[in-house]
Amino acid sequence: MRPRPPVKGRGILSGTGIILAVLTGTVVALLIPIWSAVHRPAQGADLLSARAVATPYGPLSELDRDFVTKVRLAGLWELPAGQQAEEKGTTDAVRTAGQHLVQGYAFLDQRVRDVAAKLGLDLPNDPSAQQKRWLATLNAARGEDYDREFANILRLAHAKTFTLAAEVRASTQNSLVRALADDAGTTALDHIRALEATGFVDFAALARDLAASGGPAATDSPAATGPMAGPGQVVPVAPSASPAYPLPPAESSPPPQTSRTP
């Protein structure tokens, strides 16, 4: 009896073979995400923990170190900008905002130098390239144009400082950095209010600038700006004599306690 020819549609590419191929593909699709999760680089909290440094005041993350540097950088250009506003401002409100900047950053600079010394961190003694460009813009401006440039440049910078301080305050495990974030946030908010009180802040332009730069949390100044001064070599930001203004210093948290080993 002659064997029957194979029926069309049967064989390894149909029937049981097709089912096996589908099952194999499903298993592979399920295993790929698991393999990726195991082998991808650490991100988020894992990355911060991997780069944290142990200190007597709690772990010091990369974000913490970056924040301390940026607080110092802010004072290096915003205190001189405040002094300039006291002289060049054409309205009482602009001159008052300048006084807030001078007093606030004189206070913060002392705080950040103390924190850096206790944590053994290096600090810059010069503003960043972007901050120098902002100062150059203010130096060139005159009259009401100066008032407007001062209010909007400083308001933009403070939006980013305020947001960064809140992010660090929410996430840091270091008591010294946490207290500094309290003071930086309080000071930045006071300056924001004083700048807005000038009446020159363009809120629509501010929103566009923040969106273009990646949002309030993005910073325009890098953490490092060339050679860094060691904790004992940091030059204090010393404001020149200015008319007294009854501005209370930013509220400082209670002195941080060193961590205890059980």
Image (spheres, helix red, strand yellow):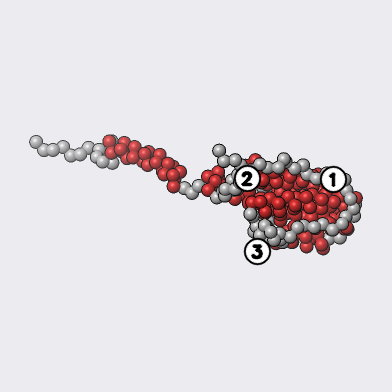
Which label's residue is closer to the chain start, 1 or 3?
3
Task: State the residue at coordinates (53%, 45%).
Answer: 46
Q: Residues within 10 Å of mark 1 (few under 14, many from 20)?
A: few
The amino acid at mark 2 is: Tyr
Which label's residue is closer to the chain start, 1 or 2?
2
Please identify, in this view, whether the residue under mark 1 or under mark 2 is nearer the observer.
Answer: 2
Distance from Cα at disc 2 to Cα at disc 3: 26 Å
Q: Seen from this angle, which residue lies furthest left?
A: 1
Most foreground residue, 194 or 140: 194
The amino acid at mark 1 is: Leu
Task: State the residue at coordinates (63%, 54%).
Answer: 120
User: Quick one: SS at disc 3?
Assistant: loop
Proximity of marks 2 and 3: CB atoms separated by less than 8 Å: no
- In the figure, residue 32 lies in which quadrant? top left
Say left or right for 203 vs 68: right
- In the figure, residue 124 lies in which quadrant? bottom right
Q: Determine which residue is flagged by label 2.
A: 57
User: Quick one: SS at disc 2?
Assistant: loop
The quadrant of the rendering that contains the C terminus is top right
| Relative image position of residue 157 (x, y in whole percent) | 74, 51
Task: State the residue at coordinates (67%, 53%).
Answer: 117
Is residue 156 visible in this depiction of the protein? no
Q: Determine which residue is flagged by label 1.
A: 247
Proximity of marks 1 and 2: CB atoms separated by less than 8 Å: no
Distance from Cα at disc 1 to Cα at disc 3: 34 Å
Q: Determine which residue is flagged by label 3.
A: 227
Distance from Cα at disc 1 to Cα at disc 2: 31 Å
Q: Residues within 10 Å of mark 2 (few under 14, many from 20)?
A: some
The amino acid at mark 3 is: Pro
| Relative image position of residue 77 (x, y in whole percent) | 76, 57
